[in-house]
């Protein structure tokens, strides 16, 4: 069923049951939002999306108002603009002016709207921080409720996406605050550290600890890729600065997972630059100096010097490996060689391992740990 | 996934996570700790239960997190899945709840199957499995009344001596209920590592060429001989991983080339594995970290992480997705495809006369993984239409992708099974290879936890993950803990017939009395010191889920 209405003088068609916000956005009208997110239930509490409807009393929150036949909507009247700006002023009156150092700078919906509406931050406002700046020991999530605008996206993301109900709202009025569990810390409130709440938070109240201070969002390159951990195959963007991976961001277009990730995908990336990464080929000393390979119990506690690692060039390492495999093949036959390919590597790499085993060496002795 | 191949003709997950989460009326999750092993899919199931009232039956010896959302939790004794499933199917048949039209039209082997199932009356099944009678009836009723129902499982089903038969049993159940080839239904093995599916798809198995083209069939041999320009490809299957390592001792295997695998940690009966790896003539290991296996390697070739290379992964629902190079390889490390290519070229140069250099795919001149994809697509019918250009355009491809215009296949077995008719198998319950006894009174099961992955090579090097979960823990029931005088600060020694480990404990109702649960993410207390190399006779999967152990307090 379609519904006909008018938005800013333009006739548009909407689906019955759509909200004014959805209908307007579908037709390219810009209505600002803070608490609304298309993945979450609308609550109408931030009142940034207010519009005027002819014949209706007061302003309506477009995210919770359903379209009606013949409705005439205005999204940009003077009253509307004034109301939005006042809302922003009230939010900012209570907000630390720390954009200079805030992790969310450049990636903050509050900041963007303050700019768009040219809000004058009221002088009577901010009375200093009311909460500790780093109030939760979670190793992945940095919590600074001073910057919270009480939009409740975190509450909804945890309840509706993660279905874990960690975040809630405590107190009323000026003291209203977002808390984990019954006012404990995240992990005690059964947080799974998925970071969904961080991904949906529009401000710097919830940020990713591992990304603090490593780069402004506009200085980071984003490369869409697929998670290296489990078979769900979530996609996300790797954030890169100066040839280093410095973070992971949800990519709303990800086919399987949308914005959702688990703790490993979102926060398990720092192994990439771990100091133990192997960066040069190595071979055992006996291979360079000749002599027998130490075997069996010789390798148990204190292996002989012949078993020391020696770093070599790629040429040397590859030549040596090829020669060894070639000799083994000649002496004991193709089936004396075993190939372990890997469920961690790409399709192309697995195909090539299979081709190497079968075409080049002539053996079907190839397997990987699918079974384990 | 041998069991599913025998039943349906394809071993892969039949449905998509999305259609299951959106459309299944009920979920039956057995042997999958979904919220910890496949967390994002786990949350999709939680959403379906909470927001659209889908029913959830969890069958697991442990009270895993997902049971919190379950309509029904069946806590079967480890190793009794077949009895449980036969019991449920018995009740379904007794009440005439089976999908008669589906069974008649699309399946075969029903009569023999029926006879077997009829030998599993509910009271007998309750006794074998420890699941109360009324729960068996409730479960069967939910299954019969909620259509479609999707079945999901993971290693909890396959890592048993009866793994293949467990899977066939689940295949039986879904045929009986007519839940195959429909959205929201199907048989859905959740693959563990990110690209297990792709490794299986593309020839990383001893019995098949890429695309599950069996090596024993002469036509396949001829096809690949012609494509690759070689003669004499064998028509006997090769050795599995769990055969190759012991093959060192027997003199069958003299050299190993290992890419990004850590058999010294992830294989069963670690002591025996290490003994073998110390004897082999040559090991080339390609890895990003000095893994436990590196101690046995003669050559170490530094590969690159997923962030440093281009390629594709295939997820558990057969979806082919791009992996993109975000940074250059660290130091002198190289993408694995480059290393394999350069090694292959050298090997061929040592023996050029063996190859027909006119053959279409004899060479190794790849400059980019997309060229490898073009070649494998030409030789692998299920990947025939996969191209980087299509993926870059945002096309969402799940195999089989039959040609360059084919849109892919989100659901398998629609209208017809891959093998034609679906095959019922008559499956009997078998006691696990190693039951508890006086000397080893506990059953130990192994698995994963949310914060770590597999042998832990990557997650143990991720700072935050280690902060939250920094040591191996053995889960033990409060009753057992009280008997052994354990508290949260205690350490225990767990001893099996093969070895012993020491670990801290987590006292929790998650495990029933008589069971301990450990993980294999930490080498200092690797659970695989204890596990046995008893393999499922068909799939050659080790029995990780049932090991008899003794538990003693050490501090
Ligand atoms: S990290 Fe995930 S589980 Fe924890 S509070 Fe945020 S949304 Fe909830
Ligand atoms: S913490 Fe962030 S998401 Fe949560 S209510 Fe505050 S501003 Fe909104
Ligand atoms: S983010 Fe988590 S659920 Fe998603 S693929 Fe990675 S490990 Fe699996």
Image (cartoon, rainbow, N blue to C red):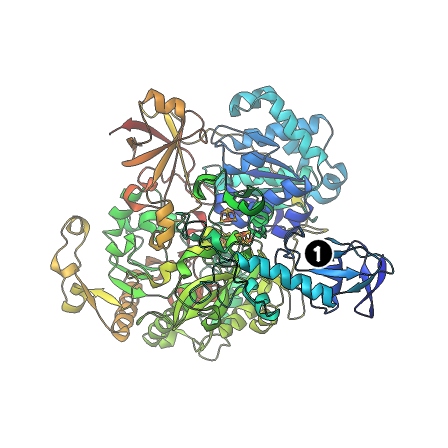
Q: In this image, B480 relative to A250: left or right?
A: left
Q: Does any portion of residue A239 appear in the rendered image?
A: yes
**Front-most of B284 and B448?**
B448
Q: Chain letter for mark 1, please.
A: A
Residue with the most extreme right position: A70
Q: Does any portion of residue B115 appear in the rendered image?
A: no
Other residues around mark 1 within 10 Å, as few (<14) / some (14–19) / many (≥20)? many
Q: Residue drawn at (64%, 68%), measured in percent from left and top? A: B403
- Give residue A172's position: percent from left, percent from top: 58, 42
Q: Identify the secondary structure beneath mark 1.
A: helix
**Front-most of B62 and B440?**
B62
Q: Residue drawn at (41%, 50%), measured in percent from left and top? A: A132
Q: In this image, B46 relative to B500: left or right?
A: right
Q: Is residue B482 above or below residue A240?
A: above
Q: Which residue corresponds to mark 1?
A: A63
Q: Residue drawn at (28%, 27%), measured in percent from left and top? A: B552
- Give residue B380's position: percent from left, percent from top: 56, 65
Count numbered badges in the picture: 1
Label 1 CB less than 8 angstroms from ligand 2: no
- Give residue B227's position: percent from left, percent from top: 51, 72
Q: Quadrant of the C terminus of chain B?
A: top left
- Give residue B553's position: percent from left, percent from top: 27, 27
Q: In this image, B513 relative to A173: left or right?
A: left
Q: Is residue B352 above or below residue B53?
A: below
**Front-most of A74 and B114?**
A74
């Amino acid at each position: 069923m379609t519904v006909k209405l008018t938005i800013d003088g333009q006739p548009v068609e909407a689906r019955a049951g759509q909200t004014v916000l959805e209908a307007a956005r579908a037709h390219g009208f810009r209505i600002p939002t803070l608490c609304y997110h298309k993945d979450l239930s609308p609550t109408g509490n931030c009142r940034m999306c207010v519009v005027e409807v002819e014949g209706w009393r007061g302003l309506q929150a477009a995210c919770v108002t359903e379209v009606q036949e013949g409705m005439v909507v205005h999204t940009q009247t003077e009253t509307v603009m004034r109301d939005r700006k006042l809302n922003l002023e009230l939010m900012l009156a209570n907000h630390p002016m720390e954009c200079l150092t805030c992790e969310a700078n450049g990636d903050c919906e509050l900041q963007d709207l303050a700019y768009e509406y040219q809000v004058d931050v009221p002088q009577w406002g901010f009375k200093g921080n009311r909460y500790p700046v780093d109030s939760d020991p979670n190793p992945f999530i940095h919590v600074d409720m001073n910057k919270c605008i009480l939009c409740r996206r975190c509450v909804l993301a945890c309840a509706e996406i993660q279905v874990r109900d960690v975040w809630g709202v405590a107190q009323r009025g000026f003291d209203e605050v977002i808390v984990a569990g019954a006012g404990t810390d995240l992990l005690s409130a059964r947080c799974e550290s998925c970071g969904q709440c961080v991904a949906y938070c529009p401000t710097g109240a919830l940020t990713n600890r591992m990304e603090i201070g490593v780069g402004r969002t506009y200085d980071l390159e984003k490369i869409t890729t697929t998670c290296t951990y489990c078979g769900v195959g979530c996609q996300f963007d790797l954030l890169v600065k100066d040839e280093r991976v410095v973070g992971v961001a949800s990519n709303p277009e990800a086919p399987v997972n949308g914005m959702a990730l688990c703790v490993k995908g979102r926060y398990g990336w720092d192994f990439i630059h771990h100091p133990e990464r192997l960066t040069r080929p190595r071979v055992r000393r006996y291979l360079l100096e000749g002599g027998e390979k130490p075997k069996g119990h010789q390798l148990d506690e204190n292996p002989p010097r012949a078993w020391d690692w020696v770093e070599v060039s790629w040429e040397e390492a590859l030549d040596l490996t090829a020669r060894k495999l070639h000799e083994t093949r000649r002496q004991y036959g193709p089936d004396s060689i075993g190939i372990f390919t890997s469920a961690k590597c790409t399709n192309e790499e697995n195909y090539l391992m299979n081709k190497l085993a079968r075409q080049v060496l002539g053996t079907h002795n190839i397997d990987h740990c699918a079974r384990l | 996934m041998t069991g599913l191949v025998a039943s349906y003709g394809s071993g892969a997950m039949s449905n998509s996570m999305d259609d299951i989460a959106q459309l299944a009326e009920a979920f039956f999750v057995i042997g999958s700790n979904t919220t910890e092993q496949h967390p994002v899919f786990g949350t999709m199931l939680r959403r379906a239960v909470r927001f659209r009232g889908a029913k959830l039956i969890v069958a697991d010896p442990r009270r895993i997190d997902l049971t919190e959302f379950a309509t029904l939790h069946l806590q079967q004794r480890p190793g009794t899945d077949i009895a449980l499933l036969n019991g449920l199917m018995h009740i379904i048949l007794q009440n005439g709840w089976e999908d008669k039209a589906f069974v008649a039209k699309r399946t075969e082997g029903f009569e023999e199957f029926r006879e077997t199932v009829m030998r599993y009356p509910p009271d007998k099944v309750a006794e074998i499995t420890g699941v109360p009678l009324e729960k068996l009836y409730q479960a069967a009723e939910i299954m019969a009344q909620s259509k479609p129902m999707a079945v999901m499982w993971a290693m909890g089903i396959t890592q048993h001596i009866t793994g293949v038969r467990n899977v066939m049993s689940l295949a039986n159940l879904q045929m009986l209920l007519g839940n195959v080839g429909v959205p929201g239904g199907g048989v859905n093995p959740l693959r563990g590592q990110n690209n297990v599916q792709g490794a299986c798809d593309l020839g990383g198995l001893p019995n098949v060429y890429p695309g599950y083209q069996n090596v024993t069939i002469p036509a396949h041999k001829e096809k690949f001989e012609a494509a690759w320009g070689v003669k004499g490809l064998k028509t006997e299957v090769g050795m599995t991983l769990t055969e190759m390592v012991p093959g060192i001792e027997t003199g069958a295997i003299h050299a190993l080339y290992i890419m990004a695998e850590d058999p010294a940690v992830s294989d069963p009966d670690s002591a025996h594995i290490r003994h073998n790896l110390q004897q082999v003539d040559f090991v080339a290991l390609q890895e990003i970290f000095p893994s436990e296996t590196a101690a046995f390697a003669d050559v170490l070739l530094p590969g690159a992480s997923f962030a440093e290379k281009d390629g594709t992964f295939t997820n558990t629902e057969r979806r082919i997705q791009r992996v993109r190079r975000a940074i250059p390889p660290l130091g002198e490390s190289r993408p694995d495809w480059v290393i394999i290519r350069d090694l292959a070229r050298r090997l061929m140069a040592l023996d050029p006369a063996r190859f027909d250099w006119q053959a279409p795919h004899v060479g190794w001149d790849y400059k980019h993984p997309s060229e490898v994809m073009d070649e494998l697509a030409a030789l692998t019918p299920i990947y025939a239409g996969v191209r980087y250009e299509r993926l870059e355009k945002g096309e969402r491809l799940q195999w089989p992708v039959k040609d360059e215009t084919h849109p892919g296949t989100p659901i398998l077995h629609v209208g017809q099974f891959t093998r034609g008719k679906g095959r019922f198998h008559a499956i009997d319950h078998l006691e696990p290879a190693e039951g508890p006894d006086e000397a080893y009174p506990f059953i130990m099961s192994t698995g994963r936890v949310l914060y770590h992955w597999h042998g832990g090579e990557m997650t143990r090097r991720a700072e935050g993950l280690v902060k939250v979960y920094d040591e191996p823990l053995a889960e033990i029931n409060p009753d057992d803990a009280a008997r052994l005088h354990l508290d949260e600060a205690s350490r225990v020694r767990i001893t099996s017939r093969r070895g012993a480990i020491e670990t801290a404990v987590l006292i929790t109702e998650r495990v029933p009395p008589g069971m301990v649960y450990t993980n294999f993410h930490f080498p200092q207390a690797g659970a695989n010191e204890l596990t046995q190399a008893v393999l499922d006779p068909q799939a050659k999967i080790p029995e990780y889920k049932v090991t008899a152990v003794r538990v003693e307090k050490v501090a």
